[in-house]
Structures are given as C-alpha cells and as structure tokens.
Image (cartoon, rainbow, N blue to C red):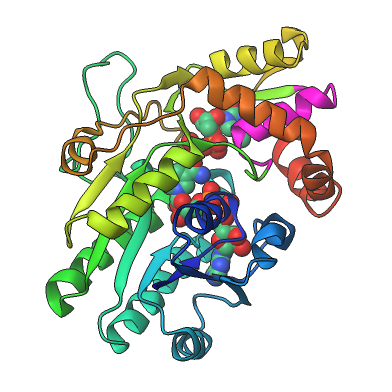
Amino acid sequence: MSTILVTGGAGFIGANFVYYLLENHPEDRVVCVDSLTYAGNLSTLRAALADSRFAFYRQDIRDRAGIEAVFQKEKPDAVVNFAAESHVDRSIDAPEIFLQTNILGAQVMMDACLAHGNVRFHQVSTDEVYGDLPLDRPDLLFREDTPLHASSPYSASKAAADLLVQAYCRTYGLAATISRCSNNYGPYQFPEKFIPLLIANCLSDKPLPIYGKGLNVRDWLYVADHCKAVDLILRRGRIGQVYNIGGHNEMRNIDIARLICRALDKPESLITYVTDRKGHDLRYAIDPEKIHTELGWSPETAFADGIRRTVDWYLANRPWWEEILSGEYRDYYRKMYDDR
Ligand code: NAD
Ligand code: TYD
C-alpha cells in the first residue's frame, strides 16, 4: 500500500484527482493537504472524508513546520502538488500571493520530499508557461521543448516553479516529474473560471461577459482525462521529464458561450462583450504526442459529452455553487465585472 499526498485537493482538479485515486487504486491511501483559500471547499471532499483510506489536513504549503509534521505523521510515498493560486485575472490584480504559494510553496514541498528520503514528487503545471500562439498559425502547437514565455503573473509563477523543480532534479537528484495541461472543465470548478461562470450566469439569466471579441482560443480537456494522465506520469513517467497533456480540442471563447446558451436553452442575447483582459493570451494548443507514445495516454471524453456532463453536474449540484456565489465571491464579481 502506498500513501499519496495530494496538495490542493479541496480545489477543482485536486479534488477530482483525490476521487480518481480512491476509485482506481483501492490499495492506496490518500492524504490531502489544503489551506482552504477562497478556492478550496471542504464540502467537495465530503464523500472522501467518509473513506477510511483518506485523511485531510488544513495546512498551508508555505508553512515548513506544518508540512514537516504532516510528513512525519503520514510518511508519504509520493506527493502530487496541485495547490496553487490559479486564476489569471486575480494574478493581474494582486500578484504577490501567486509568487508565494506557487513558487515558495512548491519549494517547501520539494524540500520535505528530499528531507524524507527523496519522496517521489510530481508538479502539476500548466500550458500557460509557454505563453501564447498566434491565431493564424493552426500548425503551431506547444511541445515540451517550446521555450517558456509566460504572459501573466500567474503563468510566470508557474514557470518559475517549473524551473525550480528542474533545478532540484539536477542539483539534488529530486525524483520529480512535471505535467503541463491545457484548460480543464468539469465538476467542482470554481465559478470564477470561464465555463462554470457561463453556466451559473445563464442559469440566473445574467449577462455572459466575453473578454475582447471572444476570438481567443483555449484547448479544453475534461478533468477526468487530466487526472488519468497525472496518475500515469506519477507511476510510469520518466524522472526529470516534462509531459504535455491536451486533447486537440481548440475552441474560441465565443463558440463556447454559444454552446452553453444552447445547452441551457437560453438566448444568445445574454452574451455581452466587455473590456479585454490585460495581456490576454491569444491561443493555447498542446501537442500531446510524448505522453501518447510513452505512456499510451489519450483523452477519453469527447467535448460534446464532457460539456453535457458538466452542465448536468452544475444543474444537479446547485447548492454547491450557489453557496459560493452568495459569499465573498459577490464582492469579487462586482469588482471584476461592474462597469467593465
Ligand atoms: P483551484 O484554484 O480550483 O484550487 C486550488 C486549491 O489549492 C484550493 O483548494 C486552495 O485552497 C489550495 N491552495 C491554494 N493556496 C494554498 C496554499 N498556500 N497551501 C495549501 N493549499 C492551497 O485550482 P485548479 O484549477 O484545481 O488547479 C489546480 C492546479 O492545476 C494548479 O496548480 C493549476 O496551476 C494547475 N492547472 C489548472 C488548469 C485549469 O484549467 N484549471 C489547467 C492546467 C493546470
Ligand atoms: P479562464 O477560465 O480564466 O482560463 P485561462 O485564462 O487560464 O485560460 O478563461 C478562459 C478564457 O475565457 C480566456 O480566454 C479568458 C476568457 N474569459 C472571458 O471571456 N470572460 C470571463 O468572464 C472569463 C473568466 C474568462
């Protein structure tokens, strides 16, 4: 039996990963470390908390002593680091916390891994570290050797963490891997992000804010496919390697907004163009050839199915997101969108 420590497991992808492990690896224990920022939600882990193979610690990854105590108690065999500040718009507004959590927090986790006999470490990174691609060159894709060229404080902090992971591999021999995934969607995504924001606004007949002209392109992947890829890399990936994760599913923002309107039978007149994001990346697109050939990974969820499942999940779990919308998120929304 292995013990896998998942940081950020009360957030969107981390929670999906916790459930993925519990379902697919009955032989493993899963320990979650999460400080429960605005984006963390313990109710997301309710079913996991009822499982004797799961343990939760409310713990900040920047806190060395606290992380050391968790390592001493749980003796993890592997760490998967999802914990991060993850929203680009917030990073433009207030970058400092992104540098602290995403870079220094990752360092604390790596130091703990080294101090406990070189515990296997996986860093969950993002395709945003590569910057963006032009809209008129569909032939160009992000490969693992594409130079880092971050645009936002968020992506710069993730790129810095990636460099640090690689430095720890080379200098201290840390047994680490990195994955860089494209945009995820699915259950439990915080409603500040594009797809759940569109769904929640549609369901309240509120305007759907589209930055700029809505022509920016993202490469969408269903969250369960990301979880499967991370699990494969953790168990079979080559130490020191970077793996891109994506499923060749590029979509323009405006087309996503129209699709959500259709899925919920709402008029497209809800679509409202607003002032563009500063430094807004034009296009992301992943070349997943390496993970496909080395680890046999391919996405299993077609976008039409994934989006239907996601919409159905938000319809069936209204209390989960309505609770968020009624809290401090209201102030965030006003600040970000009123008079935009
Ligand atoms: P999220 O914002 O939904 O969740 C982040 C979680 O981390 C929350 O539970 C939060 O409480 C926790 N956290 C934040 N700061 C912490 C700290 N200092 N100590 C402990 N816990 C802390 O994020 P997400 O969308 O699930 O993203 C997870 C990871 O995946 C991030 O590293 C992100 O960069 C990466 N990623 C996300 C996407 C995407 O589309 N969402 C795509 C590729 C990569
Ligand atoms: P987001 O979900 O924030 O992910 P990221 O910026 O990390 O790719 O945004 C996805 C796309 O949707 C991005 O091009 C910005 C755009 N967007 C809007 O047009 N309106 C919005 O209200 C939000 C949150 C995003």
Which residue shows up at 50% across the image and 60% down it? 84
Q: Is residue 117 above or below residue 24?
A: below
On the picture, is 210 further left or further right than 201? left
Q: Is residue 70 above or below residue 47?
A: below
Is residue 200 located in the magenta-colored stretch of the structure?
yes
Location of the N terminus (image quadrant): bottom left
Asked whether residue 51 is in view, the answer is yes
Q: Closest to the observer: 199 or 278? A: 199
Q: Residue 42 lies in what quarter of the image?
A: bottom right
Q: How many marks?
A: 0
Is residue 227 located in the magenta-colored stretch of the structure?
no
Q: Position of residue 283 (x, y in %)?
A: 38, 26
On the picture, is 131 further left or further right than 242? right
Q: Position of residue 153 (x, y in %)?
A: 44, 52
Asked whether residue 152 is in view, the answer is no
Q: Position of residue 229 (x, y in %)?
A: 35, 45
Magenta range is 191-207
Which residue shows up at 22% across the image and 51% down it? 242
Which residue shows up at 55% across the image and 13% down it? 255
Q: Is residue 232 above or below residue 269?
A: below
Which quadrant of the figure shows ligand 2? top right
Q: Closest to the observer: 86 or 318? A: 318
Q: Closest to the observer: 59 or 104? A: 59
Q: Residue 250 lies in what quarter of the image?
A: top left
Which residue shows up at 16% across the image and 43% down it? 294
